[in-house]
Image: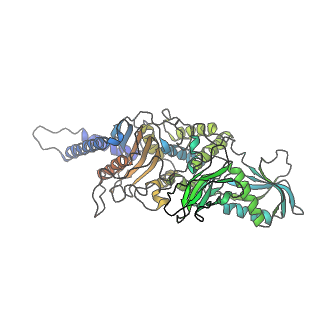
Amino acid sequence: MISASPHPPSRLRRQGGWLAAALVTVPLALAPSPAIADTADQAERVDDLRADIDTILDDPALEGATSGVVVTDADTGEALYSQDADTALLPASNMKSFSTAAALQALGTDHTFTTEAVVERRPGRGDVPEVYLVGGGDPTLNADDLDAMAADVAASGVTSVGEVFADDSWFDDQRLVDDWWPEDEAFAYSAQISALTVAHGDRYDTGVTEVTVTAADEGDAVSVDPGAAEGYVELDNQAVTGSAEAENTLAIDRPVGTNTIEVTGTLPVDADPVVAVRTVDEPAALAGHLFARALEENGVEVEGDVDRGAVPADWQRPRVVAENTSMPLEEVLVPLMKFSNNGHTEMLVKTLGRHGADEGSWEAGLTEVDTALQELGVDTSDLVLTDGSGLSRGNLMTADTMIDLLDRAQDAPWYEVWHDSLPVAGDGDPFVGGTLASRMADTAAADVAQAKTGTMTGVSALSGYVQGPDGAELYFSVVNNDHAGAAPLHVQDAIVVRLAEYLGNQVPEGTTALRSAPTVGGELECSWELTC
């Protein structure tokens, strides 16, 4: 259950002090020593905590479900609570905690990603037959970066190019994990994975475009703006503008196997515009399309087509005419972990494969994840990795394995970066609270619990840390599987609030203690449903 490796000396000293107190003998009929009294009080507090967690878990929302739950004292290593701790369960996005820890372990906090524009030779008179936009796995490359690169191409002396090629050969050509659900492919959380992709918005969603649908005159077709992908995706607009009393039945989809944005249903004439983020087919080709547009806007004529292709191996003198370097990994982790970004995580996994085995594939990358975790000291024998993000239903973990990671990570040089990337309970700033921004606010857990969420149909998890006012800390992992209906977020929240109270955190003035949070989750991460 608890890691078998030695604790740091400070933890051993504290543990030794507790054991020494426990072994004191008291003569018959004499009053207990303060040490024994403290030990008895502590045992009673732990018993009360266990009873309360049992009561919280006896919730109708968990009828028929299996819940792996572990709570551990960070100082002593004592398991304060344990239920089904070694049962293999689906982790959902709790898998990202393992993947990001492995990435930090293998790559370091300052690792960056490079995107290049390459031509065969020095431009000379200004005309080049082709330019290659070469992806290096950057999950944060955006349209502004492409514009800056296009300006550098122009500054290098290039005035026209024949063709623009998008080179995403840094990774393999498998875009989706085999068991990801096809019906999810239109949505940002299931975007195709490529070494060359363009990020959208301040959360850096990759492989997507923002579609805006606006009502027209009653009876007319709606207006559809496909955003950055205009001219790249096809449009199939079947939607009509209804009367003011009409029901809003608008649907925006990208049917499986197509690169077509399909809009159907009815949008009332007085309705506000509907904005949706939808994925595209082959993100690298979209990147090439946007780069060609940026070249034109910066005075470089594009005479031919945009296509996908790798820089020819027989080029004698390839020349880099523009380069973009990403933010460091420690900054990438903020949108990744706060908003549970699947695309970012899978790009990290393939980067690990390229870094460790010169192969940008899931198979190589997941092997490197396992290797890095073992190097960290995590026992991975109960960890099954099918992807890095947790979207796959082939992943398995135990609550004990998660506790092992939470413990081992604290001794890593990158721990603070990783810890700070975790969502913070009740913090309304989305770049701090993330997927916990609206959970546990105005409770004893607010601002003192940091944890990774994870939710998909029939699976929900919350694992992380709770700190006390005196510096004491608990590790916890709550993994719920096979529950019916919405995610039991209220159960998870109530457990974490009880842990915060156990450590001595006070409920904010003017509020009441939370034993069973009223929050009810959906069937997906709130960030995936754009509700947080």
Looking at the rendered image, the quarter that the N terminus falls into is top left
Q: Residue 202: x percent and y percent?
A: 57, 61
Which image quadrant is residue 71 in? top left
Q: Is residue 63 left or right of residue 197?
A: left
Q: Residue 132: x percent and y percent?
A: 78, 53
Q: Is residue 117 left or right of residue 110?
A: right
Q: Is residue 38 left or right of residue 30?
A: right
Q: Nearer the viewer, residue 230 or 306?
A: 230
Q: Residue furthest right?
A: 125
Q: Nearer the viewer, residue 196 or 178?
A: 178
Q: How many marks?
A: 0
From this view, report whether residue 417 is shown above or below residue 370: below
Which image quadrant is residue 40 in? top left
Question: Do we see residue 77 in this rendering?
Answer: no
Q: Residue 95: x percent and y percent?
A: 50, 43
Question: Do we see residue 49 in this rendering?
Answer: yes
Q: Residue 124: x percent and y percent?
A: 89, 62
Residue for point 49% across, 51% down: 415
Model colouring:
rainbow
Which image quadrant is residue 443 in? bottom left
Q: Nearer the viewer, residue 344 or 295?
A: 295
Residue for point 79% across, 48% down: 311
From this view, report whether residue 94 is shown above or below residue 200: above
